[in-house]
Each structure stands twice: as structure tokens, then as C-alpha cells.
Image (cartoon, rainbow, N blue to C red):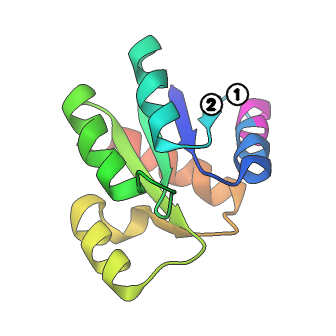
Amino acid sequence: MKILLVDDEEELVSALAERLGIRGIDAEWVISGEEALLRVKDGKFDLAVLDVKLPKLGGRKLKKILQEKCPDMKYIFMTGHGSEDDFQSISNEVGKEYYLFKPVDIDDLIKKIKEALHSH
């Protein structure tokens, strides 16, 4: 399994990738939606963990673009500044169980990653 982490908080996203790596999960990270689009050109990812509030290209819009390029990719959203509207609309797209609040517990994230990859 290969995971793409997208979050503009570089310290957070690099630490998450490292912690996933320690647990045997191949995770790459980027700090913008634009970088994520470049990264998927070079490699195939099974799942993307997207920050809802990314500058310029937000997580929801990024997901729509990624879905066209990578129709089999699964998604988990995480946010530190979620609104009720974001929660409702994203939950309708990916399921409320895949909308996580920061700080994210690494064991919960791994559990959600495995669930998402084995659903559908």
C-alpha cells in the first residue's frame, strides 16, 4: 500500500509519513495540492490523506481532480479547522468515518487507512 499525505503543515505531514513508515506503510508527503498533482504523475497511490484547508487548491477540489487522474484512489480528510458545512459535505462524499480532526492519532489513522482500502 502506498499513501500520499497532503498537508501544508510541513512538520506535521513529515512526522506522519515517518511514523507510518516505521509501521511499515509506504507514505510520501507534499505540502500543497499542486505538488500532489505532480506526485501522482510519477507514481501510483492507493490512498490520499488530504488536509481540508490547503492554500490555493483546497482538499475537496484536489480530491475531485485526483479522482479524474486516479479513479481507484481512496481518500481520508483531516482538518484542524473544520466547519459543520465541510463536515457534512465531505462526509457525504467519503463517509463521516473518514473525516478526521487534528491532532490525528497515528493508530486511528492506520485503522482508517486499512478500512478505506478494504471498502468497496
Q: Position of residue 59 (x, y in %)?
A: 41, 55
Characterize the local packing of mark 1: few (<14), some (14-19) or many (20 or more) Cα atoms within 10 angstroms.
Answer: few
Is label 1 in a helix, a strand or a loop? loop
Please provide percent x and percent y for residue 23.
74, 35
- Total marks drawn? 2
User: Which residue position holds label 2?
Assistant: 27
Give the quadrant of residue 97.
Answer: bottom left
Name the foreground residue: 98 vs 82: 82
- Above or below: residue 63 compared with residue 51: above
Left or right? Give the position of 18 relative to 117.
right
Magenta stretch contains residue 19: yes
Q: Is residue 62 visible?
A: yes
Identify the residue at horizontal 63%, vertical 52% (top origin).
8
Residue stretch in magenta: 18-22
Q: Image quadrant of residue 109?
A: bottom right
Q: Most extreme residue toward the top, as rendered?
A: 42
Above or below, 5 against 81 in this view is above
Q: Say which amino acid is labelled 2.
A: Ala
Horizontal side, residue 98 vs residue 109: left or right: left
Q: Please check the rendered image and state whether residue 111 is part of the magenta-colored stretch, yes or no.
A: no
Quarter containing the C terminus: top left
Q: Is residue 32 left or right of residue 88?
A: right
> For mark 1, what is the residue?
24
* Disc 1 residue type (three-letter): Gly
